[in-house]
Image: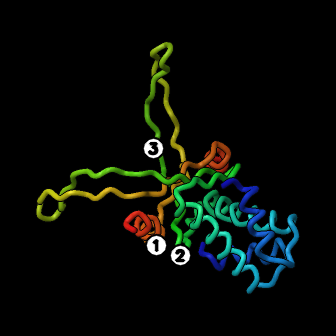
Amino acid sequence: MRKADIANQVCEKVGVSKTEAMELVEYVLDCMRGVLQNGEPVKIAGFGNFLVRNKGQRKGRNPRTGEEIAITPRRVVTFRASQIFKKYVNS
Amino acid sequence: MTKAHLIEMVAEKVPNLNRREAEKVVNCFFDSIRDALRNGEKTEIRGFGSFRLRIRRNKNGRNPKTGETVSVPEKRMPFFKAGKEIKELLNNKTAE
């Protein structure tokens, strides 16, 4: 499934045009991206939480050469599915 | 941000959409990802990331209280992988 398929669902269930549905999907994504960029979590009841985690510097290896390199500190997004979501995919 | 905040943001952004409709939009967005995964279908969202299933194989676990061996059945887990764009977005800002 892709963005356009989600937009089709929105179009059918909300009764907006396809163009509007696509814009709405983009906007929802924009909002989530903006919040995550500020380092804040996105918590969606019944779905899960998107959290930003700060990773410190650590050592890694170039798998091809075996050479040791430093992995720079970075921020990453993690997702934890809610219990409801986990049960749902197994039902 | 919670789902309620997200709904508010959508309602404010689109003038011809009332709050109830905005709620439907947001619910529909997450429901379609959830339903696809339940059907075993992955979702790839450009500029955001992808949702897919990871299979946890069945294994033998133990009841920590009694120590008896129990079989833990195979399970499917929703899994999200952040896209390249989001990784860059989050790290360019720290570099500034």
Q: Of helix, strand and loop, which one carries label 3?
A: loop
Q: Of helix, strand and loop, which one carries label 1?
A: helix
Q: Which mark is residue B57?
A: 3
| Chain hosting mark 3 | B
For image coordinates 50% across by 33% down, the residue present is: B72
For image coordinates 56% across by 72% down, the residue present is: B45
Residue A65 lies, in percent from the top left, at 11, 64
Q: Looking at numbered disc 1 in the image, what kind of residue is underneath it?
A: Glu
Q: Looking at numbered disc 3 in the image, what kind of residue is underneath it?
A: Arg
Task: Please name which of the two marks, 3 or 2, marks the residue nearer to the observer.
Answer: 2
Figure check: B74 above or below A25:
above
Task: Please name which of the two marks, 1 or 2, marks the residue nearer to the observer.
Answer: 1
Q: Looking at numbered disc 2 in the image, what kind of residue is underneath it?
A: Arg
Figure check: A28 above or below B35:
below
Residue A88 lies, in percent from the top left, at 67, 49
Q: Residue farthest to the front?
A: B96
Q: Which mark is residue B46?
A: 2
- Please identify the quadrant where the N terminus of chain A is shown: bottom right
Please give the residue where the numbered disc 1 appears in the rendered image.
B85
| Chain hosting mark 2 | B
Mark 1 or mark 3, earlier in chain:
3
What distance separates the C-alpha of mark 3 from that of mark 2?
Answer: 30 Å
Disc 3 packing (10 Å; few <14; some 14–19; many ≥20) = few
Disc 1 packing (10 Å; few <14; some 14–19; many ≥20) = few
For image coordinates 55% across by 65% down, the residue present is: B42
Residue B4 lies, in percent from the top left, at 76, 56
